[in-house]
Image: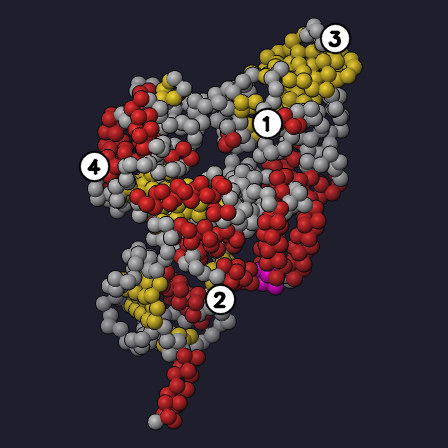
Amino acid sequence: MKKTLLLWCAMLIATVITGQTRIVSGGRPSGRIISTDSTAAALFQDFIGRISDVTIPIVPPSTTPRKGDVVIRRSADKSVKEDGYRISTAPGYLLIEGGEDKGSIYGVVTVLEQWLGCNYWGENEYSLPPHTADIGLPYIETVDNPAFRYRQSQNYALRTDPIYRLWRRLEEPADEFAGGLWVHTFDRLLPSAVYGDSNPEYYAYFNGQRHPGKASQWCLSNDEVFEIAAARIDSIFKANPNRNMISVSQNDGNHTNCTCPECKAIDDYEGALSGSVIRFLNRLARRFPDKQFSTLAYLYTMHPPKHVRPEPNVNIMLCNIDCYREVPLADNASGRDFLKALDGWARISDNIFVWDYGINFDGTSTPFPNFHIMQPNIRTYRDNNVKMHFSQIAGYRGGDMSELRTYMVSKLMWNPDADTDSLMRVFVNGYYGKAAPYIYQYLKLMEGALLGSRIPLWIYDSPVTHKEGMLNPILRRTYNSLFDSAENAVRSDSAFLARVQRSRLSLQYSELELARTEPHKDVADLTARLDTFETRSRRFGLASVNERNNSPVEYCRLYRERYLPRPNGNLAAGANVTFSTPLPAPYDRIAGTALTDGLFGGATYKDSWIGWEGIDATVTLDLGEVKTIHSIDTDFLHQLGAWILQPKSVTYSISTDGKTYVQGAVHELPDDSDPKVKFVNVKECFGSPTEARYIKVDIEGTKQCPHWHYGVGNPCWFFLDEITVE
């Protein structure tokens, strides 16, 4: 009996090793694919063909299974949830049973990845096991369900490579939301272009007036607003019968909620500005009880109301936009405030969608080492009734570690308990080949440097913020040494080399940004760095260096014009500067030097810029002595995302004695709603050489965000930097 048992165990081990269920034998298919899901069947057939050059035939789903077949069908097992799957080889054939939506597809992906050695890294970038004429599977019996029923992230490949999206198990708003209405939908549902002039009472009241506009919020206590929105929503659902969710959510922006007596009374009673929003959404939820309504808990609506509870079909999309990212949410004040909000919503709803930010909007090519906080934060969401999750990351081609970042968040959104270090090692080994050890060291070294610096990591960061921390000169030399080693390790493999060089772009961009802040520049070295960054950006398809779609080619052109030393110099260099209105903090710290130090500010307003909010200002320069001048120009910043608008007008006046001034032309600047970051130069040229010691610059600010801006009705800034006199 003992001998028989040992023989049976040996046979079982041998069967598992060689594959109990044969898929391909001797270069021929062992069976057929019987599937109710054509996409899943085609994906399995495709990759088996890539591994073995064997095409397994796909037969009608009514075919009776037999040994060696692959059966893919919808699961009747209640333990298999939406997008989940059951995989079994117990019947003598491979059985993949998927839950609703894409469970069958994800089951196929799991078999290909976990048992057959395939993996998918990026856009048409994948790994296969060695080519073979025999493919078998061991005994498998498993059920797997995702932690979140809806998982969304960003990557350029999601729209260009359909296999990539399936492999990463990610969804997009069009999969869920009717009519493409996904976040910031107020103006789409109640267009200010239609109702703004005729019915300003439909829009938010604050600062003593109504504020109709493209970015305006609604007066949520207005019954007419409710009925118009309900009618519009009804028509959208009827036009999209296969979708049952829509977002009815505030426009982007802050401090723009309605404070009319009725709305204010609701919010005061509820102890939160979300009170009027939830009451409005609850009315819609009761009007359409078979539909789902998503709304934002964002900026001023982040915290939950005290009394009203969201209806079961009201989905709360909670956003942590104001949190710093250098540590998990529980470990800094901004994160703890968000966790307080999450706990509050979780107490009154189990229909929560968390929008998490792992992106630097002002520098998508800036290093953003947040891999160490992904797992603890995602676990927190899972443990607090969160059912849907969007991890917004820098998914641009050539953005900071875009491929690794999407890989990590997609894996963790499926299983928040996965081993993150193992995930990272699997990716870097598969994606970078022999360069992997150096890339891994780079990632871990920068992570440690960020934590050791105790400098916050922000979604509107600049490399300049970290010039004494994770991007200090010694560390940058180490990073570059690691990348040099990585490139050398894969020099003979063009695919791996391209991946390493593309991943290096963020470090190269950071070094350019830091170099422009230095008073003394090695022009030859900077020119070479610019040429390399521009050449590689073109080669690897880096489309933008920030959320505002400023291209790297444009960046390099502006860099050469703006930051490299000017041949004619500046007569105002080191001039004494006085202001009619004191500068607010923190800009007062650089007031004496910012405009005449020869250093031009960057796109993030983090260095060199000074400015005022909601007022006009006058700046006066004393050149120290009477000089002959030909022109004056001032540098202004246009950065709509930070509520920084170019001024309405700029006027120059000159004087030899500081008492009597001769005024020049009034330079009027038009309204500009272009979201691109711009440097606006306002220049006055004199027809003939003119003598002056004192130069006065009168700046008329825009003062208030216009109707098209998402800060509508609130004060806006103007920022200026270098004043150049030639």
The disc at residue 287 is 4
In front of the other: 332 or 179: 332
For label 2, the residue is 128
Mark positioned earlier in the residue sequence (3 or 4)? 4
Neighbourhood count class around disc 4 (C-alpha, 10 Å): few under 14, some 14–19, many 20 upward: few
**Mark 3 or mark 2: which is in front?**
3
Magenta region, residue range: 432-436
Mark positioned earlier in the residue sequence (4 or 1)? 4
Q: Are marks 2 and 4 in contact (CB under 8 Å)?
A: no
88 up-or-down from 465: above or below: below
Q: Taking the image as drawn, is residue 670 in sight?
A: no
Neighbourhood count class around disc 2 (C-alpha, 10 Å): few under 14, some 14–19, many 20 upward: some
Lateral position of residue 218 relative to residue 583, left or right = left
Between the residue at mark 4 and the residue at mark 1, the CA separation in whole angstroms equals 50 Å
Helix, strand or loop at mark 3: loop
Q: Is residue 226 magenta?
A: no
Residue type, mark 3 in image: Asp
How many marks on residues? Answer: 4
In front of the other: 286 or 646: 286
Neighbourhood count class around disc 3 (C-alpha, 10 Å): few under 14, some 14–19, many 20 upward: few
Lateral position of residue 178 relative to residue 559, left or right = left
Between the residue at mark 1 and the residue at mark 2, the CA separation in whole angstroms equals 57 Å
For label 3, the residue is 657
Helix, strand or loop at mark 1: loop
Location of residue 522 (image quadrant): top right
Helix, strand or loop at mark 4: helix
The disc at residue 585 is 1
Between the residue at mark 2 and the residue at mark 4, the CA separation in whole angstroms equals 52 Å
The image's colouring method is secondary structure
Between the residue at mark 3 and the residue at mark 2, the CA separation in whole angstroms equals 79 Å
Location of residue 554 (image quadrant): top right
